[in-house]
Image (tube, grey):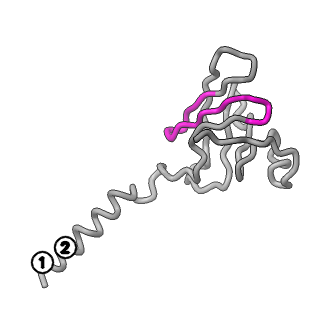
Amino acid sequence: MKRFLVFICLAVTFVFMSCGGGSKQENHGFAGSFTDEFENKFVLNEDYTGTILFAGNEKKEQITWSDGDDHKRPFATIKWNGDPAYYYLRDGALYRQETDMNEGRAAIKITYDE
């Protein structure tokens, strides 16, 4: 019986360690590389940093992004050039305005890189 309890404790510990215990690693799949319909190229890193390479520009612009303090928000905001909500990313589309995102209009199509 004692061995069984030790085994259960070790198994539970292993599960929590491998999951990260719900840490900020959860990002609803926002991290990754994608291109929008205007040929702007985005990279969102899992550490909430990234870059934008605007079409026709040779310089990658540094960005940060967020999916909320608890990392459970269904959308991400992309901060660039001091604007904390330069883009909104939700359900595989970019938006320039939060109201457009909430109402499902004026979506900018994106294609994730493989």
Q: Is residue 23 magenta?
A: no
Taking the view exactly as shown, the residue that stands out farthest to the top is 58
Question: Is 99 in front, or is 7?
Answer: 7
- x and y percentages locating residue 18 in the rendered image: 35, 57
Query: Cα distance, mark 2 to mark 1?
Result: 6 Å
Q: Which residue is mark 2?
A: 7
Looking at the picture, does residue 43 appear above or below residue 1?
Answer: above
Name the quadrant containing residue 60: top right
Marks counted in the figure total: 2
Task: Kindly state the secondary structure of the residue where label 1 is placed.
Answer: helix
Q: Which residues are magenta?
A: 36-51
Q: State the residue at coordinates (60%, 33%).
A: 43
Q: Is residue 81 above or below residue 18?
A: above
Q: In the rendered image, which residue does mark 1 sit on?
A: 3
- 87 vs 47, left or right, is right
Locate the C terminus by quadrant: top right
Helix, strand or loop status at disc 2: helix
Name the residue type under label 1: Arg
Name the residue at the left extreme: 2
Quarter of the rendering occupied by the N terminus: bottom left
**Residue appearing at x 74%, y 38% in the figure:** 87
Q: Residue at x 67, y 33 (%)?
A: 79
Q: Nearer the viewer, residue 60 or 13?
A: 60
Tell me: residue 9, above or below residue 109: below
What is the three-letter code of the residue carrying label 2? Phe
